Image: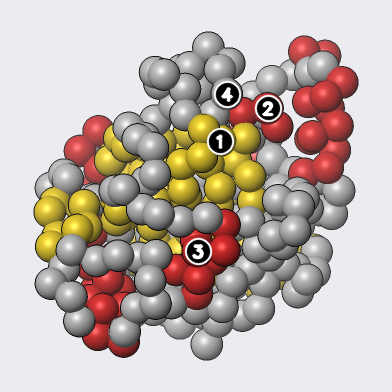
């Protein structure tokens, strides 16, 4: 095992990792140390990485089986596990979300690698939903513990249909070409740490048992705790960087502040387990089969 150095980036989320070359095969002790750092810090930043798509996939496999790129969006040509997060393909990531929560078992972890960066802007925000849960006043925490939310990829877009051009309309149609709806606990228990986190975000559209209007008020109230500045890592991208984050207990947001200049990251995600609430009840699928996208992690 190499001498891994871990430097916190903020008090509540994020650490910069040095002393390990993630372009090379990692021994079990190193993987265990990185997993421990991910459990504690939720998001890990690796600088000056020498990775291509194949190397990014090899690194991500240290944490489990890979998903394909996305349930409905095409992968990088010749690399079925790699999703191009490309400004030319729209701004679908410009809302707070946890990756692919509309399926039964969303990814446990996501990796993003810088490919093309604008000269300014284009940061990625990553928020700790565990810190958000700890911030909740006790009455709100007790309420959240009892709630379930329905997540869907046919989510409430902020841009009205009449303002969407043909290219964006085609992208939206592709994203929703298979409709997924899944019920998840609003408070998810992390399977490795036992931490509780708010499992909501942009794909969570309705609280089970409540109207759309009632749901939005409650989801907005809880989401306000997730996006408190104290709970957020604002990551400014540099060339040859990789960020690994725990998708089970974070949300993220790609800031559209770079004047439409080229920006591309490549994403590889690790298959996850079925979320479990505080009473031990598992999430359940309502519509859509994602077995072509992801295996279920043990």
Q: Which residue lies at the image location 83% right of the left edge and 42% below the top edge?
A: 174
Label 3–label 1 contact, CB within 8 A: no
Disc 3 packing (10 Å; few <14; some 14–19; many ≥20): some
Label 2–label 4 contact, CB within 8 A: yes
Q: Earlier in the sequence, mark 3 or mark 4?
A: 3
Numbered mark located on residue 88 in the image: 2
Q: Mark 4 points at which residue?
A: 262
Residue 134 seen in this snapshot: no
Comparing labels 3 and 1, the label whose residue is closer to the camera: 3
Label 3–label 4 contact, CB within 8 A: no
Number of numbered discs: 4
Q: Mark 3 points at which residue?
A: 55
Q: Name the residue under label 1.
A: 264
Left or right side of 71 for 120: left
Q: What element carries label 4?
A: loop
Q: Which residue lies at the image location 84% right of the left edge and 54% below the top edge?
A: 178
């Amino acid at each position: 095992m190499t001498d891994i150095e871990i430097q916190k980036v903020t008090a509540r989320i994020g650490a910069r990792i040095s002393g390990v070359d993630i372009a090379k095969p990692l021994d079990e002790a190193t993987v265990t140390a990185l997993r421990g750092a991910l459990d504690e810090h939720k998001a890990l930043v690796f600088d000056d990485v020498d990775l291509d798509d194949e190397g990014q996939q090899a690194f991500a496999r240290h944490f489990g089986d890979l998903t394909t790129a996305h349930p409905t969006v095409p992968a990088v040509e010749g690399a079925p596990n790699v999703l191009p997060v490309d400004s030319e393909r729209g701004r679908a990531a410009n809302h707070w979300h946890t990756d692919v929560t509309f399926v039964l078992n969303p990814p446990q972890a996501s990796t993003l690698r810088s490919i093309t960066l604008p000269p300014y802007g284009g940061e990625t925000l990553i928020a700790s939903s565990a810190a958000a849960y700890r911030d909740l006043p006790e009455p709100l925490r007790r309420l959240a513990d009892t709630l379930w939310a329905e997540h869907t990829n046919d989510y409430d877009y902020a841009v009205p249909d009449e303002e969407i051009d043909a290219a964006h309309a085609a992208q939206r149609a592709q994203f929703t070409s298979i409709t997924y709806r899944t019920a998840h606990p609003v408070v998810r228990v992390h399977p490795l740490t036992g931490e509780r986190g708010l499992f909501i975000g942009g794909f969570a559209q309705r609280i089970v048992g409540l109207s759309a209007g009632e749901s939005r008020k409650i989801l907005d109230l809880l989401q306000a705790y997730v996006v408190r500045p104290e709970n957020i890592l604002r990551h400014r991208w540099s060339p040859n960087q990789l960020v690994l984050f725990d998708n089970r207990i974070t949300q993220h947001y790609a800031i559209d502040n770079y004047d439409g200049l080229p920006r591309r990251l490549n994403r590889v995600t690790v298959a996850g387990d079925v979320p479990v609430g505080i009473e031990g009840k598992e999430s359940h699928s309502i519509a859509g089969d994602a077995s072509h996208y992801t295996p279920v992690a043990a």
